[in-house]
Structures are given as structure tokens and as C-alpha cells.
Image: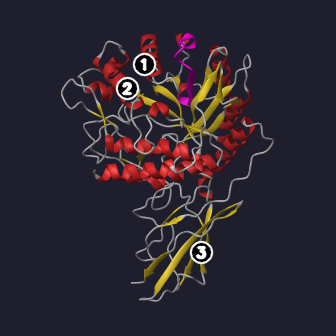
Amino acid sequence: MNLLQRLSLSALSLFCAQALAFDEFITRDGHRLMEGDQEFRFAGIHAPELHRIEDDARGVCEADPRGWGQYFRWPTADEQENWIKALVKSGHKAMRVYVLSVETPYDEACGRETHILAPADKGGMPRLNEAAMVHYDRMIALSEKHGLRLILPFIDHWKWWGGREQLAAFYDETADDFYDTNSKTFAAYHHVIRQVINRTNTITGRKYRDEKAILAWETGNELKESTEPFVRKTAALIKALDDNHLVVDGTYLKINQFSLTDPNVDIISNHFYTTNNNNSPEQVHKDLQEINAQKVYLIGEFGLRDAEGLNSIMQAAVHAEYKGARAAGAFIWGFRGHRHNGGFYWHKEYTGHYSYHLPGFPEGEPNEEQAVVDLVRKAQAQMAGLEAVPALPAPEAPILRAIVDPRERINFMGAPLGRFYRVERAISQDGPWQVVADNVSDGVQEYRPQQQAIFKDTSDLTPGQMYFYRVIARNESGESAPSNVRQVVLP
């Protein structure tokens, strides 16, 4: 038995010993999503990278001619759990993530891996990368553990993570061949779908088709050139493989009339952005009217505008109604979570907007971060029928990382929903503890771990002395238990 198998069995044993968050799959009743006998609605900040993260702090990989950063890495288990806890504890019930990535010729030079690998033999079918999929497994397992439903799209229309164009390149076909149901690329796309749905999760031991944390499969991300044969054949395949989960037509910028009558399509989605001339509350009303209460309606993404404008769209998502039908959910783009060794990941869009960090930080004020978090939490409360937004839970303990020289770097992984931190020091593991600093924030917008530290102890320290450190998180609802203790002998 190899190390990966031993680790998987260990994780499986631990997971099976925990209570599961979900008793049933999400189902559809006409234009409504249902969790048991209750309507299921949700609002949130879109977290596309729960299974693969782009590290913007590394800059641009010059070997990749597509531009953008293109430095990707797999999240650690601590990171994934931290992000999912932050989402759930702030009121998120569901999340749509980003697509499975496809191999490109530039991956090795940029030091990255993808989910989908080229065929082993020329003209064969693509393969799933096991090293990548274990992180996908863990995302699903942790979502089950903490109570987050997942919407999972397969392949991208766009090229940034490797999409239809890169899949087509395996067969010397073009990006447009992806939508041609007679092409080799389309056959490869369906082969990927079969592999994913039939995959056995290495942590839970269940087939993906039996995972209750999965809310729905989405045909892909922003597949704006979807044709009727493409959608019908793909939705039929998904339902034939998996009758437990719902299917989202991943088209956007239009409502496919054939999807409204297709028995295998459950959810109609759209994305709003100013560049598409649809980033307004009026689009919610238009879409609801066109869907005509025949299917569930999802606003899969909207954003990259001011908080006031985002709130007007989100309030339309909450309240707009046509023939009794309302939006089931809406996600604002986009969220980034804590780094393993401290600070947050971040991404700056072409509009100047940054990704949002939970629970919102003073450093994010130019990005209207707190206002956006607040408007999302308000919508969550409204969808749940609450009269007021619940208080955030007090944070759990942060994780203090190893210290080499406290005068140079004291890094800790921030607690989910921690807003400020108190750093304490002692010369004995049992204390007494002295407050070194209070109101320390890890909410820097463009944190660069190679050049920055979350905190430095600039006190008058004695060389050769052993010191002990711990960190306590707090927010407006209270403070955490102390972190783990780290010791260091001052050089």
C-alpha cells in the first residue's frame, strides 16, 4: 500500500467518524430548489478557487503567452477548510466553483498541474490527474462536513484555466469544435464528464454521483455558443449517469428556449457584467420573464461594480418575482481566502476591483469590501425569512506557524471570520502572557509573503532567551481561544 493510499484510508476513517451535514440531496419542484420540504435559496460571494488557486503575488509567468498571472497551485487542507468555514460561518449555504483545468503546453515552464491531462496515446481520450483530483475530493468532503452545497461546472468556454480550446488542441481541432457534437473534442468532453461523475472520492469513499454536498453539475462556464444538440446531449448524459443531482445549463447572455422544455435541464443560469451591458437589476426581471416559471433561475456571477449597484442587483435577486418564481441564488464575484502561512490570496481585476476577504477589513475600504460583505449577508437573511442579519459567530483559534526569528516574521493563518488579532509572549509555556500587540490585522489587500510579514516583534528581546508566542483572534462577537504555542530561541 503506497503513501497516498494510506493517507486516503486515514482520511476516510476520520471522515466517517464525523457527523454528516446533509440528510438529502437538493431537488427541484418546478421553479424552486428544495431541501427536503423547504425551499432552498442562497446568496454569496463567489469562491471560484476552492480546489485550485492562482497566486497573483507571484506575478506573470512569461512562458505562458496567454497573459494574466498563470501561477497556479493546489490549496492545502488547512486552506480549504479555512475557506469553507469562513463561507459557512458568514451565512453561505451554497457555492459555485470554477471549472476543471485543462493541460496546456506551458504548464511545466510555469510549474503547475491541471485536472485534465492530454491522452496517453495520440487520438485517445483525456485523463484525470489523480494528484489534482484529491484536492477536488477534499473540497467535496469538507463541504459535506461543514454544510456547503456545491455547483460544479465541467469545462470553460475561456482559455485561462485551459478550456475548450486546449481540449480541442489534443485532437488538432479548433475551439469551436467543442460545440460540434460530431467532433472528437465533444467526445472528449463527454469522456471527462463520465470520469468525474463516476469517480470515487478518496476521502469519503463515495462516488461523486452519491455525494450530497453536490447541488448540481453545470455543463460548463459561460458556454455562450451552446447549441440545442450540445445542451440536450450533455444534459441527457449527466442524468443518465447521475439521477441524484440537478443540471445547470451553463450558457450565459441568453436563455435557451430548448432548455426550458428539456426534462434533463433543471436550472437556467446567467452572468451579469458591465462589459456585457447587462449588469443591472432590470436583467433579473427580464430573465425571470423569459424563463416564465418553467425552471429554476440562478445568477451564477455578477460584479465588478460599486457596492450600491451590486446591492440593487442583489435586492432584485431576493425580491423580484414573476408568476411566483424568484431567483434561487446569486453570487457576487469574487472571494479569496487565507493563505496557509498567513495573509490572504488576492486578485485585482481589470476594473480595479479586488477580490473580497471575509469578514471584511478596513484595508479593503477603497474596494468597498465591508459594504459588499454586509449587503450579501443582508440578502442571505432576507432569503431565510429573518428580520435581521445574525451576528457573526466569534472566531475560532488561529494557527500560529513556526517562528525562526520573531524580529523578522511571526506568521499565523487567520481564523475564519477573525477581524483582528492579539499577539502574546511569555518566557514559559504556561505564562504569564504579555500582550505584545493588539488589533493586528491580516487583511492587507495585496499581501506578498516573500516581502511582507503578518507581524514582527520589535520589542527589546534578549539573545539566547527562549520565548513562547500565541495569538488570539477576535471580531465584534467575541474572541477565540488561544492559538497553538510556538517556541523560539532568539538568535
Query: Which is nearer the N-term, disc 3 or disc 1?
Result: 1
Magenta span has 293?
no
Query: Which is nearer the N-term, disc 2 or disc 1?
Result: 2
Position of residue 332 in the picture relative to residue 341 (left or right)? right
Disc 1: which residue: 237
Is 273 rendered above or below residue 334? above
Q: Secondary structure at mark 3?
A: strand
Q: Confirm or deny contact between disc 3 and disc 1 (CB under 8 A).
A: no
Quadrant of res 165: top left
Disc 3: which residue: 437
- Magenta residues (range): 259-275
Residue 70 coordinates in the image, percent (x, y): 36, 43
Disc 2: which residue: 194
Is 42 rendered above or below residue 322? below
Magenta span has 264?
yes
Camera sees residue 273:
yes
